[in-house]
Image (cartoon, grey):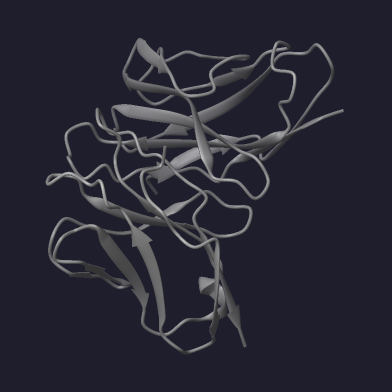
Amino acid sequence: DAKTTQPNSMESNEEEPVHLPCNHSTISGTDYIHWYRQLPSQGPEYVIHGLTSNVNNRMASLAIAEDRKSSTLILHRATLRDAAVYYCIRPMNAGNMLTFGGGTRLMVKP
Amino acid sequence: DGGITQSPKYLFRKEGQNVTLSCEQNLNHDAMYWYRQDPGQGLRLIYYSQIVNDFQKGDIAEGYSVSREKKESFPLTVTSAQKNPTAFYLCASNSNRSNKNIQYFGAGTRLSVL
C-alpha cells in the first residue's frame, strides 16, 4: 500500500511549467512527503522533500496543501531531460523504508 | 566520489542456477535495501538491513537471500527457487541517523533468464 495517489501519466511541452499532483489523505502529522524521479533504465534519484511549508531547490519546488492531504511537485521549465517517472512517497510506519507506487510518467514534447 | 555501485549491469541466469548481485556503498550509511522492478511497474522491496549482521524480509523475499557482513556491502542472491527472476534490481542505502529518509540508489542490475 503506497498510501499515495498519482495520475499514471502527464504530458508537457518543453520550457513550460509542469505541476505533478499527489494525494496523501491519510498522512500523519510527522510524515515527510518525498519525491523521487526515475529516468529510463536508471535508479531513482531524490528530487525534494517537505513537511508543512513549501520547499524549493535547484531541481524543483514542492507545494504542500495546508491540510497536508495533497502536494504538488512543480518543474518550472520542463526540458526533454525531465522526461521520467515521478514518485510521490510517504515513509512507511517504522524505520526508514519508502514504498514506491506506480508514479506518474511525465512525457515532454519538444 | 561517494555513492552506490551495483554490478554487474547485465546478468544472465540459467535454469536452476543461483546468481549473486553486488551492491557496495561508500556513503557510511547504516541501512541498505534491495528492490525489484518489473517493466512499467513501481519498486517492490525484497530485503533490507538496518545494521551490520542483521536483515529483514521485505514484501517479496521468497526465492532471494542476502547477507550483511560488512557495512559497505549488501549482496543479493537470486536462488533457483525464484521462478520468475527476470527484472531490474535496484540497491539503495540511507542513514539511520536522519529522519529525512532520503535514499540513494545504484544504477541497477538487469537480470534475464537464458
Total count of labels: 0
Residue A20 position within the rendered picture, expressed as x and y whole percent measured from the top left: 41, 70
Question: In the rendered view, does B19 fall on the left or right side of A19?
Answer: right
- Work out which quarter of the rendered image holds the C terminus of chain A and state it: bottom right
Where residue B77 appears, as percent x and y from the top left, is 61, 17
User: Which residue is depicted at the point 71% across and 26% down?
Assistant: B85
Q: Is residue A60 left or right of residue B110?
A: left
User: Is A19 situated above or below A1?
Assistant: below
> Would you identify the image quadrant in which residue A94 lies?
top left
Question: Is B41 left or right of A100, judged from the image as shown?
Answer: right
Q: Do we see residue B102 in this rendering?
A: yes
Residue drawn where x is 39% and y is 15% of the image: B56
Q: Is residue A3 left or right of residue A69?
A: right
Pick out the residue farthest to the right.
Answer: B114
| The quarter of the displayed image where residue B16 is located | top right
Up the image or down, B67 lies above or below B9; here it is above
Q: Quadrant of the N terminus of chain A?
A: top left
Q: Nearer the viewer, residue B8 or B44?
A: B44
- Residue A84, position in %: x, y? 54, 64
Q: Residue at x 54, y 23 (%)?
A: B60
Residue A59 appears in the rendering: no
> Which x, y percent locates residue A59?
35, 71
